[in-house]
Image (spheres, rainbow, N blue to C red):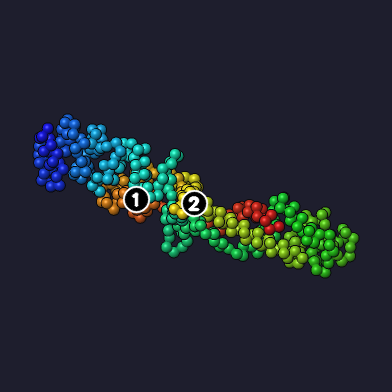
Amino acid sequence: MAKIDKFLELFHSVRESDYNKILKVFNTTRNFLKIVVKYGQQEDVDIAYIPEYEWRNDRDLMAFLFDNGFIRGDFSQYEELEDNVKNRFLLWFLNYDEETALKFIARRLLNYDVSTEKDGYYLGVVKRDELSNFFRSYSRETSPRDLAKTVLSEDDFFERWWDTTDNVYRDVIDELDSTNEARLAEYILNEIGNKDLSLDDYDDDLFYEFSEEQGTENTFQITNSNVMNLIGDESAMYELLNGDLGDLKSELYSIHSSAYNGAYESECYNLVMDGLQEYFVGKFDWDQIKQSDGKIKYYPKIKIRDLSADVRKYLEVYIDYDYNYTLDYVDSYVRMMDQLFYDEEIDKIDFRIPDYPDYQLIDKYINEYFSDYI
């Protein structure tokens, strides 16, 4: 027993010459460790003293160490390893027991912004716009990153357009569904219905028809029986919009502006949220954190789509790197992904930003907003 203890002293020496004495006797580190197993002294071995080249050259070393009791079940020896071995250790750990490895990584190494929940792993951030760095950036034009920062910001979304139409009849009235047409008819009747209107002020052919039908000489009235004919006639409506229905005209412009900007905002929001689905699942939820003063503060969180794949990619790329690339140094999921993005090992989220909103969505919002104005 004393003889193996002597070799254990050499094994744990910081001098390379002492380690070479082991290799002269046993030829390989693996052969020496087999003798340690034979004597049942695995707990006396600090695997952090295994030279770096052994980890690289012996692909099965990790499995041997684990199967023979050199690696503790809680994998806490990770912290004792040399920095340029740690990523290799974790990669083997993931391949050997993914569930246990992910819990270890999430709870011990990426716990700055990753939380473990029943249905998976969640990224928690102070502000949602921190995730704008997941999107591609351009130097000379508005980029997906710029848009993501705006959409994910807690501030109100910008309004890009003010004068969105020069024809509210075609762009608003013509797009109304039957419910809103009836609402418009009711509004017109409330404003000018059953009142004498002069043909000197309004000379559209439709108004002469109304006058003739009503048996008047120089006047006409908008009534229940003809208001829908009025709404269906662009030129007649425009005469009234430029006259007694001036307030209605102003509201119609506001409706179109709101619908236009709302449609664009909605498109942009969906582009950003759909883009996030490349790395995340679903929408943002909120964590309630009780502060030291007793107040409750809410922090956004979102489920990570595939933490295993993301971590595995990082470990594979930086497998033998130094301390600056270990997960305990990186400390967070966002910083880990930032490094992969920076080195172009993975792609940032990208999409084409539309120049204008979709007209079908504008029409949808016109009908949704109409009752708020009319």
Q: Looking at the image, which is closer to me, 88 or 252?
A: 88
Q: Is residue 63 visible?
A: no
Please identify the quarter of the rendering in which residue 220 is found.
bottom right
Q: Which residue is at a point 13% across and 37% down the rendered structure image?
A: 5
The vertical placement of 228 against 310, above or below, is: below
Image quadrant in which the C terminus is located: bottom right
In the picture, which quadrant includes the N terminus? Answer: top left
Q: Secondary structure at mark 2?
A: strand
Q: Position of residue 266 (x, y in %)?
A: 56, 54
What number is the disc on residue 186?
none
| Amino acid type of the residue tagged 2 in the rendering | Ile
Q: Which residue is mark 1?
A: 331
Above or below: residue 167 compared with residue 120: below
Q: Residue at x 83, y 65 (%)?
A: 197
Q: Amino acid at mark 1?
A: Asp
Residue 64 sits in which quadrant?
top left
Whole-number angstrom distance, CA of label 2 to CA of label 1: 26 Å
Q: Secondary structure at mark 1?
A: loop
Query: Would residue 322 appear left or right of 202 to someone viewing this image?
Result: left
Residue located beneath label 2 in the image = 296
User: For the residue carrying disc 1, how many other residues have a C-alpha within 10 Å: few (<14), some (14-19), or many (20+)?
Assistant: some
* Res 283 seen here: yes
